[in-house]
Image (cartoon, rainbow, N blue to C red):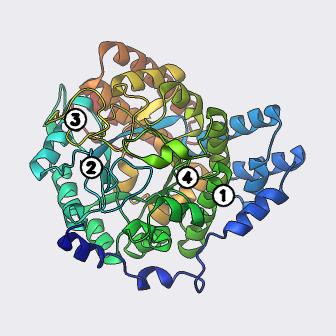
Amino acid sequence: MKTADLSWVNNVIKEEQYKKYMNGDKDFINDEEIWEKIEREKNPDPRKIREIVKKSFEIQTLTPDETAALLNVKDPELWEEIYAAAAEVKKKVYDNRIVTFAPLYCSNYCVNNCLYCGFRRDNKEEVRRRLTLDEVKDETKALAGKIGHKRLIVVYGEHPLSDANYIADTIRAIYSVKVKTKNGYGDIRRVNVNAAPMSVEDLAMLKEVGIGTYQVFQETYHHDTYKQVHPFGTLKSNYQWRAYAMHRAFEANVDDVAIGALFGLYDWRFEVMGLLYHARELERQFGVGPHTVSFPRLTPAKNAPYIQKTQYKVSDEDFKKLIAVIRLSIPYTGMIITAREPARIRREVLPMCTQTDASTKIGIGAYSEINGSDGQDLAKQQFFIGDDRELDDVVRELAEMGYITSFCTAGYRCGRTGKNIMELLKTGKEGNFCKLNAILTFREWLDDFASEETKKVGEALIKKEMREVKSRTPKVFSPQVVGELENYYERIKNGERDLYF
């Protein structure tokens, strides 16, 4: 490592910013306690499981014992009940909409050496690159002007070349882009960030430039495994600095935070429990849980030795189980199923999820094809993508399945974030906003980007959605709201954009 890089590394972690939240030398994950609960809840009574599911329908966070009981279910028929309940809980909170986004990788330089990651420092075959701000704008023009995305998750390796100042500059660059489309214009209205743990001061700066959700995955909550896959002496080897990243984000007044685990590093049941403990810790400290939870599985990556030797690869059957348990355990949260997974898996679990990506490319500069290519090159990306279908194909499939694609970012601009949104989610009221704004943004996207085949399927779905809104009048939607929806809808058809509730 260069001397300048080492100097930067030595100044990143601020111990006082996480130790104040700890109980002495203990963090909020107790490995022995988690395994004790999993073991104690073996062979749960089906009546107990159904009572736990009933609690989830009330949109209450489960206790660790309750989640451990769900994880121990063996009966296939009872699992089918759990899957159905998870889908119903998702619909109760978020209605039938699926939010789409795209990842934008800005830099793959990294000072860490994680044994499962293609970006790892010792991977000498990785082609390293950091986008210039003009290149960031070119990528954004392709995403917002050609494909039609309205929200991004922007991804960075941990390195002085992609520090908080660079992240702030890229966020500004993305928001500055506005592109003419067939009938309106394309722009990015929500920039979420997947980056390394940061200090309160750096997060406060990102808040000022308009960061959306701040996403940091713990990767694995199991302390020994965490130590094994994150070599000593790297920034990422500090478990607590990472575990308390969300605490610092809330302290910096970042409204929405996102957590996740990389399934396949350790036993999937333990990781589900870790996610629950993390959510409950945030609720306890700040009264706000995670805005989203992610659950990626290990996929092939170049020169990543742990992927080949891990004993904890998650089967498709167990993957579906863990998603259902997360949905019931943290019922209010958004849940992201990514393009790491093949299309058939995404179709199967989407009823329990709220967000997915499409037209996904994770090579640096790949959307605008600046030194990029149409295929996947593991020397230029972090891992292998399982579903590389275009957004138009995904949107059409969702519509055929009865799900409306939402490009809505209204809640963030109306103050429905952080604590303000929690009560709306837990009472099901947020789902009403979701339905109205999904209709409007879907209409906008169909007119600006859809193929004729997708537009035909999409318009049939919109008619169905409009009928459903009217059928909920006046119990849910007042006649005034329905009238305003119809007014906004016609204005969007006539070329106006970004109208929302």
**Corner quadrant of residue 444:** top left
Dot 1 or dot 3: first in sequence order is 1
| Location of residue 63 (image quadrant) | bottom right
Disc number lying in front (1 or 4) = 1
Query: Disc 2 versus disc 3: distance between alpha carbons?
Result: 24 Å
Where residue 439 sits in the image (x, y, percent)?
A: 41, 33
Q: CA distance from mark 1 to mark 4?
A: 15 Å
- Which one is earlier in the sequence, the residue at label 2 or at label 4? 2
Write the residue at 54% across / 45% down. Answer: 309
Q: Which residue is mark 4?
A: 333
Front tag of 4 and 3 = 3
Q: Of circles 2 and 3, which is in front? A: 2
Asked whether the beta carbons under mark 2 and mark 4 sit within 8 Å of each other, the answer is no
Give the structural element (helix, strand or loop) at label 2. Answer: loop
Nearer to the camera, 490 or 344: 344
Residue 378 coordinates in the image, percent (x, y): 32, 37
Which residue is found at the position 30% from the left and 17% from the top? 451
Say above or below: 365 vs 246. above
Q: Which residue is mark 3?
A: 367
- The residue identified by callout 1 is 273
SS type, badge 4 = loop
Whole-percent x, y for residue 326 in the image: 63, 49
Work out whether mark 4 precedes mark 3 in sequence or the reverse, and give the earlier one: 4
Which of the marked residues, 2 or 3, is nearer the chain's N terminus?
Answer: 2
Q: Earlier in the sequence, mark 1 or mark 4?
A: 1
The amino acid at mark 4 is: Thr
Place residue 12 in its image quadrant: bottom left
Q: Secondary structure at mark 3?
A: loop
Residue position marked by numbered label 2 in the rendering: 124
Direction from residue 32 to residue 469 in the image, left or right: left
Q: Amino acid at mark 3?
A: Tyr
Q: Are marks 4 and 3 in contact (CB under 8 Å)?
A: no
